[in-house]
Image: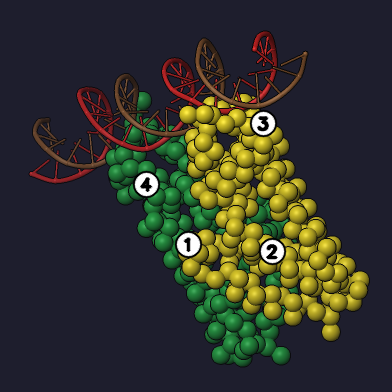
Chain colours: A yellow, B green, C brown, D red
Amino acid sequence: MSIKKLGTEVRQDQIAKVALNLLGSYGMSGLNMKNVARPLGIVPSAIYRHFKNKDEMVDAAITYFQERLLSNTNAVCAETPDSLERLRMLLMRHIKFIQENHQSLPRIVFSDDVYNRHPERKTKVYDLIKCYLKRIGNIISQGQQEGRIRPDADPETLSLMFLGMIQPAAILWHMSDGRSNVTKHAEMAWKIFSEYLKAK
Amino acid sequence: MSIKKLGTEVRQDQIAKVALNLLGSYGMSGLNMKNVARPLGIVPSAIYRHFKNKDEMVDAAITYFQERLLSNTNAVCAETPDSLERLRMLLMRHIKFIQENHQSLPRIVFSDDVYNRHPERKTKVYDLIKCYLKRIGNIISQGQQEGRIRPDADPETLSLMFLGMIQPAAILWHMSDGRSNVTKHAEMAWKIFSEYLKAK
DNA sequence: ATATAATGTGAATAACCGTTCACATTATAA
DNA sequence: TTATAATGTGAACGGTTATTCACATTATAT
């Protein structure tokens, strides 16, 4: 039985991904050293070769999550110059992200296990959300300057409402074990949202 | 040191309230027998006089939560006959509910600790949300029949978007430790939402 | 007032989890 | 090839938590 050994950078990535997956699928209760080690074919104590402790492992998982979420905003800006189209695509990408990664975002945000007694981690997640909202707000502002979006709308309120199109549908999707149709709801919500947004 | 003994109905209520409070404030990780017992001035093992085990205690907490949440819809329907006004009041009540009870709703929904390996509990929470959404949808339908709300809007989509006005703002409020202004956001979001809703 | 049931106590148990450590195995550099 | 560092292993430890149990205390009915 030959044991395959991998470099610590590769392992750190693998561990972070598995950790995030567990967090999204089973919550913080499913995120323990044994569950992380098993799919990688290693033993729990081996994780300590690559992370000082569980906290640093969780931090890595959150950082990985952060990169994945924010990359969506860059992607849609590269795909189209139109502000309304950017919003629509971001909405669909976010839905897809949730369906793939289960409920990482809300679970991270609401599981106080994640940052109970870790104030710096809480502000880190807070900054992530603020950053995401800021980017949505920027797309809206840009659309207003170009005359595509009505000028009397407040970008800050609207970016929060944008997230609001996703969240509750994600809850239902999550609780119905994927039986409810998130994509369809997102499309219908987008019709309503974009009708409001459009400059007359 | 005289020990005060209380009837099991009273204790069950007390325990359920404390449990829900802990769940809302610190998440499932803060919800253990010791933390529930302390504020009641009893010892952890005493809880087993009133609940068979922790699961039944958590169930009682969720039931208590359910009653509190659904009572809001009854209250607004009693306060005013106007559908739009009912929705606005329900929005404000929900915000207040979140501020008082911290993050019970999303934490229950997203903490898989709550119903990992408890499918019946998951469907119970699922039914609660569906019921809440149904009641919102009924208010909207009623407004459409009375000609107060535009008839081309889909009540189901709109009731989900109604929750969407609250959720993301609640996240920010939660993560900023109450520094962000949920009420103000709710008012601004309501302006936008109701403008769309109004029949022309 | 007294017997009996209900409620509260504190110690004990078993399971789980994060973490450490001495040792084994594999990769890498000389 | 060989020496050395990096990576993986399995057993062990301490802490936490839910749960049980024999016992003490308080309420309630007769």
Q: Amino acid at mark 1?
A: Asp
- In this view, the residue in front, B79 or B2, is B79
Q: Position of residue A44 (x, y in %)?
A: 52, 30
* SS assignment at label 3: loop
Q: CA distance from mark 4 to mark 2?
A: 37 Å
Report the disc number at residue A93. Answer: 2
Q: Nearer the viewer, mark 4 or mark 2?
A: 2
Q: Which label is found at residue B133? A: none
Residue underneath mark 1: A177
Residue at which label 4 appears? B55
Answer with mark 3 or mark 2, whichever residue precedes in sequence: 3
Q: Position of residue A65 (x, y in %)?
A: 67, 48
Q: Do dots 2 and 1 share one subunit?
A: yes
Residue plotted at (57% across, 47% down): A21
Q: Quadrant of residue B94?
A: bottom right
Q: Secondary structure at mark 2?
A: helix
Q: Earlier in the sequence, mark 2 or mark 1?
A: 2
C-beta proximity under 8 Å, tags 4 and 1: no
Q: CA distance from mark 4 to mark 1?
A: 22 Å
Secondary structure state at the residue bearing disc 1: loop
Residues at marks 3 and 2, CA–CA distance in whole angstroms: 33 Å
- Residue that label 3 marks: A7
Asked whether the residues under marks 3 and 2 belong to the same chain, the reply is yes
Q: On screen, B161 above or below D23?
A: below
Chain for disc number 3:
A
Amino acid type assigned to the residue bearing label 4 in the image = Asp
In the image, A42 versus A47, the foreground residue is: A42
Whether label 3 touches label 2, CB < 8 Å: no
User: What distance separates the C-alpha of mark 2 from that of mark 1?
Assistant: 20 Å
Which mark is nearer the camera, 4 or 1? Answer: 1
